[in-house]
Image (spheres, rainbow, N blue to C red):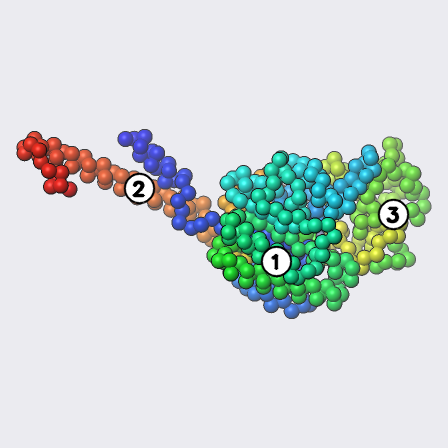
Amino acid sequence: MKSYLCLLWASSILGAPVNKQRQKVLLISFDGFRWDYDHDVDTPNLDKMAKDGVKAPYVTPPYLTITSPSHFTLLTGRYVENHGVIHNMWFNTTTKLKKPYYQTQFVNEWWDNGTLPIWITAQRQGLKAGSLHFPGTASSYQGENAMKKEVEPGLYNYKNETAWRVNTDKVMGWLRHEDLDFVSLYFGEPDGVGHKYGPDSPQRQEMVKQVDRTVGYIRHSAEQHGLTDLLNIIITADHGMSTVVRKRPDDITLYKIPGFSFSDISFYLLDYGPSGMLLPKPGKLEKVYNTLKGVHPHLHVYKKEEMPKHLHFAKNDRILPIILWADPGYLINHLPVQFNKGEHGFDNQEMDMKVFFRAVGPAFRKNLVVEPFESVNIYPLMCHILGIQPEVNDGHLNATKCMLVPKTTTSKGVDLRQNAFTGLAAVTGFLAVVFIVAMSYKIFKKKSKSERGGNMDEIF
Ligand SMILES: [Zn+2]
């Protein structure tokens, strides 16, 4: 009897027959959506999302403030030095080979280097996950893939609003009809127009209007798919955008720097906006470092072990021994081959690198503006809403839990209390049945004794 009661009790406490359904999360990134892009454009749908949910004035992305490293931070909650996707470009310092952004999406070992993205963690804990176009989607991780995944084809038109709607409906279908719990969804703009025309251009403003219409469509589609009460939508970005001035008299072009010679360099990543990395030849590190350090007032030169701590961009073998970055307005050139009017990749403390953040759904409070936070904290927030155990990460739920409705903040406690109540009720019911059976048996026995062959119907 005792063991029976324990089993009954345990199943009531640990089982999952909680009335409410598990909440879902849709993480959306609009590439290069700077924190203030809604300040100079009419954005009724983004405004409504803020009213119906939570807004942060801005969020700080990790350094290096470029696409793949920052997106992998959203998926893992780790700083770039810890998750290892340190650049958009895969490279090999021995063979000197480099692959551009899109090709690097398909270099599995670049992504699968020890840190698990949330898709895999969720799936290992019994949930279903998917991803559409989000950087990192093409790769497998420890042999596992997101259950539903779609990678954009080469030469993809990232601007097409109709395709944005088709993709939106597709992921809503995954969430509704295939019961996925987590989906990450990526849109490649307004990064493209920010680069080409600059962050202050009318083209960027037009693209923000397209983003706003799409946000309205996303929420409408969620409603049409009957997901409003279950789905939490988080919209953010990977980095901001800053105006750069080309052909300035004081531009930073390495081959022009007196004493600097590429013959001292074994491998380099340059001509990538305002950031660069150098691998000097053996015995040349001090020479290269001393030649570059302090040579230009807007060029920052660091040995990786001396990198400012707040950048979290040092402790990884993939990071090259000398790291360079420029102040806003400047680029770092090997040769003067860069033509963009807007760039990112600057220090993440620069306001131009900060990103946008909105969240809406059953887990989130309404009409709330929270303090700015770092984007490493989005991962533990998503794990909490999904009810999964996060991997080791650099974020803290404390940084974001103020945006959650109290029920979700204490959901484990509430569930436990609910379960405890259910358990008590079950045990009480069970004891009542035992009592009735015991009493009945007693009466039956008594009756049998006195009447011989008494009818059970009389007893009940
Ligand atoms: Zn980007």
Asked which secondary structure carries label 1, the reply is helix
Asked which secondary structure carries label 3, the reply is loop
Q: Which mark is residue 426?
A: 2
- Residue at the spot 27% in from the left edge and 41% down from the top edge: 428
The location of residue 439, given as percent across then percent down, is 16, 36
Q: Which mark is residue 166?
A: 1
Q: Which residue is mark 3?
A: 334
- Residue at the spot 80% in from the left edge and 41% down from the top edge: 98
The location of residue 22, given as percent across then percent down, is 47, 48
In the displayed orientation, state which residue is furthest to the right: 258
What's the residue type where badge 3 is placed? Answer: His
Asked which secondary structure carries label 2, the reply is helix
C-alpha separation, residue under disc 2 versus residue under disc 3: 73 Å
- Can residue 307 be seen at all in this image of the molecule? no
What's the residue type where badge 1 is placed? Answer: Val
C-alpha separation, residue under disc 3 versus residue under disc 1: 41 Å
Sequence order check: which comes first, mark 2 or mark 3? 3
- Residue at the spot 81% in from the left edge and 57% down from the top edge: 340
What's the residue type where badge 2 is placed? Answer: Ala
Query: As rendered, which of 420 and 371 lies closer to the eye?
Result: 420
